[in-house]
């Protein structure tokens, strides 16, 4: 039994200082340190020279990371790659390098004001910057681009397996609401040959979305539309998708989004909400960790009962929950029969 298990004070101390390793991973990912470490040991001074970093400070950062299995120090200053370091290298098979440094300057500052959100129920962004997170990102190109790259990074890993879990075999038309640059709709079209899809998002986002690579067969079944999901979306589709959308918003804003989708649905349409469902009890779950971060935006994760209440408020019914191999679930929603 470890000392942390027998000594509650030590365990609390370890948890409290967790932000140190978090930010260390962020810096390593942002600077691309893992790109210069391989199966052959390399000295920190050589990496520092290549990346124009301070040799002493880089060594100390890498020594910390190695203590968590992110790199392996074989001799003083000499480091090897590990499976964990490969996860933050640009060419790692399942790399999340972009996602690992998505917590930009403003997000880091906002999370530092978590106390404000807990005390008032308000988002920290508005308190700090006078505007919500997405308004802020719209006005800061560098942070917005990094956030977009991070979301794409997560999505490209999870999209294929989540798409397999969506029961769309009977659907002929689909609208991906807030679908970003089209990664998920590409996965859905690839796995459902009968399906035609419309990518819907804000104009400046949709304009960056190209047709689906060189796959002309998919391009023939794909189009784009733009606007605000608080106002109006394309109507009459067999299926609608909201992936990683509702957890960014308050209940009030979620109801507005859901009302917009409901207005576009036919009696036979299905809505697929793809988000985490917070499990009951004390079981650890990533949704519980990320929720504290989301609260500083004004968002939140939800348990099954909270989702049912949300849908009920706008006259929709939760008809099924489909688990996926990821922390996300597919919630099938429809109009009352």
Image (cartoon, helix red, strand yellow):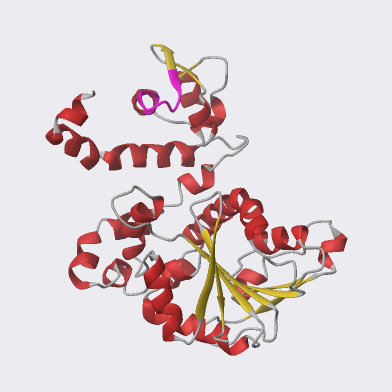
The correct choice, above or below, for 337 with respect to 55 in the image is below
Q: Is residue 67 magenta?
A: yes
Report the label total: 0
Taking 123 as reference, is 40 left or right? right
x and y percentages locating residue 117 in the rendered image: 24, 67
Question: From which residue to which does the magenta span run?
Answer: 65-72
Q: Is residue 133 visible?
A: no
x and y percentages locating residue 272 in the rendered image: 58, 70
Picture quarter with the C terminus: bottom right
Picture quarter with the N terminus: top left
Instruction: Report the residue at 43% width, 30% height from top.
Output: 53
Residue placed most toward the observer, 158 or 297: 158
Residue placed most toward the observer, 95 or 149: 95
x and y percentages locating residue 89 in the rendered image: 55, 35
x and y percentages locating residue 209 in the rendered image: 69, 65
Taking 224 as reference, is 325 left or right? left
Q: Quadrant of residue 224?
A: bottom right
């Amino acid at each position: 039994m470890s000392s942390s298990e027998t000594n509650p004070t030590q365990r609390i101390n370890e948890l409290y200082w967790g932000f140190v390793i978090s930010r260390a991973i962020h810096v390593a990912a942002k600077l691309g340190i893992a790109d210069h470490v391989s199966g052959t040991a390399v000295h920190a001074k050589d990496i520092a020279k290549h990346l124009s970093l301070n040799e002493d400070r880089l060594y100390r950062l890498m020594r910390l990371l190695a203590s968590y299995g992110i790199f392996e120090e074989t001799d003083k200053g000499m480091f090897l790659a590990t499976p964990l370091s490969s996860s933050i290298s640009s060419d790692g098979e399942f790399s999340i390098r972009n996602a690992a440094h998505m917590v930009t300057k403003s997000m880091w500052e906002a999370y530092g004001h978590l106390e404000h959100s807990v005390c008032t129920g308000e988002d920290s962004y508005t308190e700090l910057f006078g505007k919500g997170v997405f308004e802020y990102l719209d006005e800061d190109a560098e942070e917005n681009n990094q956030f977009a790259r991070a979301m794409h990074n997560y999505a490209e890993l999870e999209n294929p397996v989540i798409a397999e879990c969506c029961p769309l075999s009977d659907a002929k038309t689909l609208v991906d609401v807030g679908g970003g640059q089209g990664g998920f709709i590409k996965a859905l079209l690839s796995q459902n040959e009968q399906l035609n899809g419309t990518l819907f998002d804000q104009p400046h986002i949709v304009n960056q979305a190209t047709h689906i690579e060189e796959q002309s067969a998919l391009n023939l079944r794909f189009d784009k539309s733009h606007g605000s999901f608080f106002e109006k979306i394309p109507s009459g589709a067999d299926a609608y998708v909201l992936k990683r959308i509702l957890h960014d918003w308050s209940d009030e804003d979620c109801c507005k989004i859901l009302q917009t989708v409901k207005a576009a649905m036919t009696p036979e349409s299905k809505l697929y909400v793809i988000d985490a469902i917070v499990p009951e009890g004390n079981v650890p779950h990533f949704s519980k960790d990320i929720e504290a971060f989301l609260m500083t935006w004004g968002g939140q994760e939800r348990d099954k009962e909270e989702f049912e209440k949300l849908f009920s408020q706008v006259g929709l019914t939760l008809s099924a929950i489909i688990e996926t191999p990821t922390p996300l679930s597919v919630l099938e929603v429809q109009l009352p029969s």
